[in-house]
């Protein structure tokens, strides 16, 4: 470990303070907005200390509580998309991790090119398709189409976890007479379980934060919370208190999950390409 | 072929089949309808064959070239800024001073937000009347456009880039920091013994060793910025006028606001071609020696 001169230390801490204020200040300021009375949203110079007001949360989630069902919808769509992607991703990740096959590199690149392709290209035809087959505004329309992102992401991340399960253990099971399938369930699944959980949590967050698919494919009663926030931009004015209250609730699950994931954050955000 | 040899392909098949279905349908849909006149407001079905008209109309009735220019500018400048700012922060974190672990853990918070939420957050901060940022800048004597930064044609796109940079610089910082940790002490000591100074060390040892990670991050971020939709939608709605339209937003406007499905289909194919060219150039030039 390097040693630092006291002056150098001071400079580093000063710079880090600027960094932290720049990146966390806006979030804190927005959280404060959720607790301000709507009439105080634009008070300048800004008031750091004020009487907290819970009315914004009551209006949006309790009475009349128009956003409470959206919270449930977000949970349904994100969990649904995550659960549906897992079996597809798990079998593909196992194949890519454990078998030598021709075109492996091509397939990995293909998955990632789906992840970085513009989703708007897909979503407009889905919009028309869903109304033709009678799925317009349904949960399953969102859950199914989100797979274009959920499966490629989970394949990549899961593969990085399965790669880390020693092949010896699996081979030992085969020698003992276990079939490949049995070895998969007895060795791979338990040992890759943390990876499976981490992958599910990331897929959940990415589905939760996705706005384009629900924006286009949901209807009023199935729309998700981040999309719900948008509706407060009414022609009659912008309801900042309500926007902030719903946005704060929408930002909590991803924040909590990222804090829980701790050392896996780097790996998840890079689809397993950087171990971190 | 025996079952043993087929097994990996059988295991890949379900995911490949569902994904192929999910992408070939939209692409096929767009290919067919790009040659048909079809506005969803007037007809639930394509109306008549219109040859290459839709492709011509993309350039005539939508600001396609402007959107392409905006998109490339946003993606290029945004990725550049995020990479170097992130690198700077990664080097600060790498000082291993007390408290850096905690700072690293909370620094990632902006990246966890939904882009829509980040958009709202900055719309509030940038409000021309009552927003804290214009107020601070005015206090510092920096001129603020009367319509606000988001309502001014010269600053709207730049502001979108700034919000994205705010959101994603922490991502670069923590991943590049992880990269810095993976560089072995021996290499660094060897360079020091050879008399390499701090700067020299960074350019000739650290940076080349981070190259594989950096190449990956830059590709991901460049494309995510290239696809920018959420932030544009919330922050400027493509405006003022068409000053901050991106390709994705242009597609959205034509397809889901004007319901010009035929024209949107043609534009979809132009965008798909542009994106494939970028991805393949990148794969060819940067990833030839990759290691996954």
Image (cartoon, coloured by chain):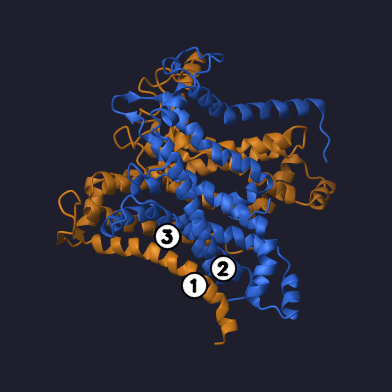
Determine the residue positioned at 51% across, 26% down. A30
In the picture, one chain is orange; tell me its letter.
B
In the image, A9: left or right of B75?
right
The location of residue A68, given as percent across then percent down, is 43, 36
In the image, B203: left or right of B250?
right
Report if the CB atoms under discs 2 and 3 are less than 8 Å apart: no
In the image, A18: left or right of B63?
right
On the image, numbered disc 3 is attached to which residue? B276
The lab-note entry on whether marks 3 and 1 share a chain reads yes
Question: In 3D space, how far apart are the residues under numbered discs 2 and 1 (Cα atoms)?
Answer: 9 Å
Question: In 3D space, how far apart are the residues under numbered discs 3 and 1 (Cα atoms)?
Answer: 24 Å
Determine the residue positioned at 60% across, 51% down. A268
Say which chain tag 1 marks.
B
Question: Quadrant of the rendered structure where residue A228 is?
Answer: top left
Tint applied to chain A in the drawing: blue
Label 1: how many Cα within 10 Å (few below 14, some 14–19, many 20+) = some
């Amino acid at each position: 470990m390097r040693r630092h001169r006291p002056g150098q230390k001071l400079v580093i801490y000063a710079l880090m303070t600027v960094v932290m204020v720049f990146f966390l200040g806006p979030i804190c300021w927005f959280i404060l907005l959720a607790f301000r009375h709507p009439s105080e949203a634009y008070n300048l110079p800004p008031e750091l200390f004020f009487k907290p007001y819970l009315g914004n949360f009551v209006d949006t989630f309790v009475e009349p509580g128009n956003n409470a069902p959206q919270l449930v919808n977000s949970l349904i769509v994100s969990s649904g998309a995550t659960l549906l992607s897992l079996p597809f991703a798990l079998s593909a990740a196992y194949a890519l991790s454990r078998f030598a096959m021709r075109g492996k590199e091509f397939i990995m690149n293909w998955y990632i090119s789906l992840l970085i392709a513009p989703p708007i290209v897909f979503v407009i035809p889905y919009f028309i398709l869903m109304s033709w087959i009678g799925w317009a505004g349904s949960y399953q329309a969102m859950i199914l189409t989100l797979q274009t992102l959920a499966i490629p992401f989970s394949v990549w991340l899961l593969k990085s976890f399965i790669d880390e399960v020693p092949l010896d253990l699996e081979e030992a099971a085969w020698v003992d007479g276990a079939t490949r399938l049995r070895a998969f369930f007895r060795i791979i699944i338990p040992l890759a379980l943390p990876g499976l959980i981490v992958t599910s949590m990331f897929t959940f967050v990415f589905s939760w934060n996705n706005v384009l698919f629900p924006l286009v494919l949901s209807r009023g009663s199935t729309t998700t919370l981040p999309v719900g926030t948008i509706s407060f931009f009414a022609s009659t004015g912008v309801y900042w208190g309500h926007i902030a209250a719903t946005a704060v609730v929408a930002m909590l699950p991803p924040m909590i999950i990222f804090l829980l994931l701790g050392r896996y954050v780097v790996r998840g955000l890079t689809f397993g390409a950087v171990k971190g | 072929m025996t079952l043993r040899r087929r097994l990996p392909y059988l295991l890949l098949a379900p995911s490949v089949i569902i994904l192929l279905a999910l992408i070939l349908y939209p692409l096929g849909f767009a290919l067919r309808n790009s040659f048909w006149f079809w506005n969803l407001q007037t007809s639930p079905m394509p109306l008549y064959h219109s040859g290459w008209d839709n492709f011509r109309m993309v350039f005539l009735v939508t600001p396609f070239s402007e959107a392409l220019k905006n998109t490339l500018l946003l993606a290029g400048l945004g990725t550049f800024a995020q990479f170097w700012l992130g690198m700077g922060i990664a080097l600060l974190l790498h000082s291993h001073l007390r408290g850096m672990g905690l700072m690293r853990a909370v620094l990632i918070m902006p990246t966890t937000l939904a882009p829509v939420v980040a958009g709202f957050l900055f719309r509030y901060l940038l409000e021309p009347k009552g927003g804290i940022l214009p107020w601070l800048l005015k206090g510092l004597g920096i001129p603020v456009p009367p319509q606000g930064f988001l309502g001014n044609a010269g600053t709207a796109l730049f502001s979108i880039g700034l919000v994205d940079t705010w959101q994603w610089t922490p991502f670069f910082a923590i991943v590049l920091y992880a990269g810095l940790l993976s560089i072995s002490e021996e290499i660094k000591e060897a360079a020091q013994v050879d008399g390499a100074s701090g700067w020299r060390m960074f350019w000739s040892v650290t940076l080349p060793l981070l190259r594989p990670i950096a190449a990956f991050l830059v590709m991901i971020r460049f494309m995510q910025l290239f696809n920018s939709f959420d932030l544009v939608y919330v922050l400027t709605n493509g405006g003022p006028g068409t000053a901050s339209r991106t390709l994705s937003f242009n597609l959205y406007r034509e397809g889901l606001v004007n319901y010009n499905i035929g024209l949107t289909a043609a534009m979809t194919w132009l965008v798909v071609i542009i994106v494939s060219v970028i991805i393949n150039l990148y794969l060819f030039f940067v990833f030839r020696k990759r290691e996954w």
